[in-house]
Amino acid sequence: MNITGRLTRNAEVRTLSNEKQVVNFSVAVNDSYRNRQGERVEQTTYFDCAYWITANVARLLTKGTLVELTGRVSTRAWVNKDGEAKAGLNFHTSQIKLHGGSKRAETVQATAQAKNNSITAQGENDDLPF
């Protein structure tokens, strides 16, 4: 599954007891549709995301960055401290594409390769009109 949205906060790296690292971040996905009355309805869905392949990508994941994610969705439910039932969406991310917001509309693509846990970044910075 693919989702595209903006980060709502800077990514955080957590180190687990087994020394494995996970990058956690949150993404807001905006959508709109027309209801039966023909009115435009705006809707925002929030995903809590986890990326396990390499922690190096965390430095690129800053609040407001537009990202395209590939992975799978899962749900979670819990009861908060006030006894209220809550639910949320998790996105287990396997690939991240960063879309930069610079004046030149650069696109930065970050792809992690599971074999060697490294990250590659490519910037498109040419003057071609297409």
Image: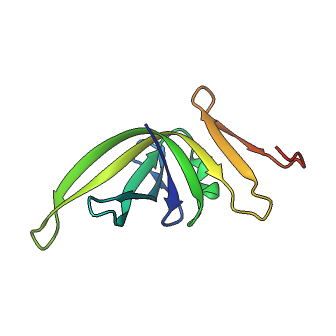
> At 19% across and 53% down in the image, what residue appears?
77
Residue positioned most to the right: 127
User: Which of the pair 130/114 is nearer the observer?
Assistant: 130
Q: Quadrant of residue 64?
A: bottom right
> At 34% across and 49% down in the image, what residue appears?
90
In the shown orientation, is residue 57 left or right of residue 121? left
The location of residue 74, given as percent across then percent down, is 30, 43
Residue positioned most to the bottom: 82
User: Which of the pair 113/122 is nearer the observer?
Assistant: 122
User: Which of the pair 98/30 is nearer the observer?
Assistant: 30
Q: Quadrant of residue 114?
A: top right
Q: How many marks?
A: 0
The location of residue 50, given as percent across then percent down, is 43, 48
Residue positioned most to the left: 83
In the shown orientation, is residue 79 left or right of residue 1? left
> At 90% across and 49% down in the image, what residue appears?
127
Snapshot colouring: rainbow
In the shown orientation, is residue 35 left or right of residue 81? right
> At 75% across and 63% down in the image, what residue appears?
102
Quarter of the image where the N terminus is located: top left
The location of residue 26, given as percent across then percent down, is 44, 59
Residue 17, relative to residue 5: is it above or below? above
Residue positioned most to the front: 37
In the shown orientation, is residue 85 left or right of residue 44? left
Residue 97, relative to residue 39: is it above or below? above
Quarter of the image where the C terminus is located: top right
The location of residue 121, given as percent across then percent down, is 72, 43
